[in-house]
Amino acid sequence: MALSVTRRAFRSLNNAIASSFSSFNELNGHYGVGHSYSSFEASTFQKSQSLPLASRRFSTSILTPGSSDDDFPSNLLSRKALLTPERDIGLYQDLVIPVTNFHNEDKGFMVLAGDVFDVPIRKDIIHRVVRWQLAKRQQGTHSTKTISEVSGTGRKPWKQKGTGRARHGTLRGPQFRGGATMHGPKPRSHAIKLNKKVRRLGLKIALSARAAEGKLTVFDDLDIPTHKTKNIVNYFKQLENTKKLLMVDGSPIDEKLRLATQNLHYVNVLPSIGLNVYSILLHDTLVMSRSAIDKIVERMHTPINR
């Protein structure tokens, strides 16, 4: 008795599965999704009689609002934001990032090269590059006068013996007021040497850190309608947790953008050729145009000439 009941229940389950798939095929044929039950291998499904296996072999389309409104009812599409799992940093994986503009309009997506925007974070490399930058930009114009450069007479101030005073041959020595400075600083270069590979790696790490923090924004372009400062101020107010903003453009800086940002101490603009590690670290948010990213990636992929 128990065996007959089990077979009957199993047959009813098969009938329910077949009817559900047939109704799903009718729905697909009506809306033109393009998937049907015939995409299965019928022999596999009949032999296994297993729903999990059939579910694994079945494939569906991912539709988004606005992508195929004519093919599928828009009220059945989910408009909620998809939560993506946290990724591991430094795996050299290409990143897909949305592209926008100053008006927060959707301009599509852009793929960021993984060997430039997803490298392992190394603080020691960043420290070396920043130290190299600060040392190289130091002017080194400090200068002191030696005994031959100090103005004054060269005669002996008093005779060698008989006065009870210490013997001196000149008043321009370092022990006298207004005299020379011994071993003082002279104009020189404070620059230190750093391999080109290390400099390039430092820029990659800085870009990867901003991308991992979610502080890297890609714009279609950096064009603004007028040179008014309020255009940049209104956009800056929309940003969250931002104190300083750095904009990078691939071409020479537009005159309107330069005039709009020159009075804002918290917004700076750089061409892609001038992008450096220290400037990235000084600004907590980075905005780059498509052309800037293309030129940076091209620069990072260019072989180093020895």
Image (cartoon, rainbow, N blue to C red):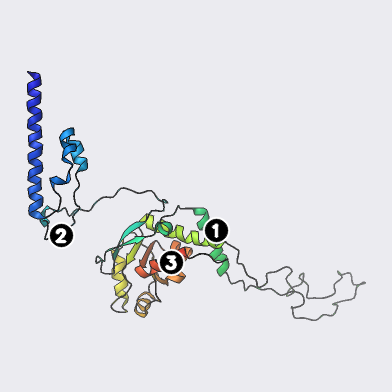
Taking the view exactly as shown, the residue that stands out farthest to the top is 1
Residue 246 visible, this orientation: no
Residue tagged 3: 298
Q: CA distance from mark 1 to mark 2?
A: 52 Å
Which residue type does callout 3 highlight? Glu
Task: Label 3: state its secondary structure.
Answer: helix
Camera-side residue of 93 and 154: 93
Image quarter in which the N terminus is found: top left
| Tag count | 3
Residue 213 visible, this orientation: yes
The answer to whether 147 is drawn above or below residue 217 in the figure is below
The earlier-in-sequence mark between 2 and 3 is 2
Which residue type does callout 1 highlight? Arg
Task: Label 1: state its secondary structure.
Answer: helix
**Looking at the rendered structure, which numbered label has been put on residue 128?**
1
In percent of the image, x 49 and y 59: which residue is there?
202
Camera-side residue of 60 and 140: 60
Which residue type does callout 2 highlight? Ser
Q: Are marks 1 and 3 in contact (CB under 8 Å)?
A: no
The earlier-in-sequence mark between 1 and 3 is 1
Residue tagged 2: 68
In percent of the image, x 61 and y 71: which residue is there?
140
The earlier-in-sequence mark between 1 and 2 is 2
**Looking at the rendered structure, which numbered label has been put on residue 273?**
none
**Callout 3: few (<14), some (14-19), or many (20+) C-alpha neighbours within 10 Å?**
few
Camera-side residue of 190 and 272: 272
In percent of the image, x 9 and y 39: which residue is there?
18
Comparing labels 1 and 3, the label whose residue is closer to the camera: 3
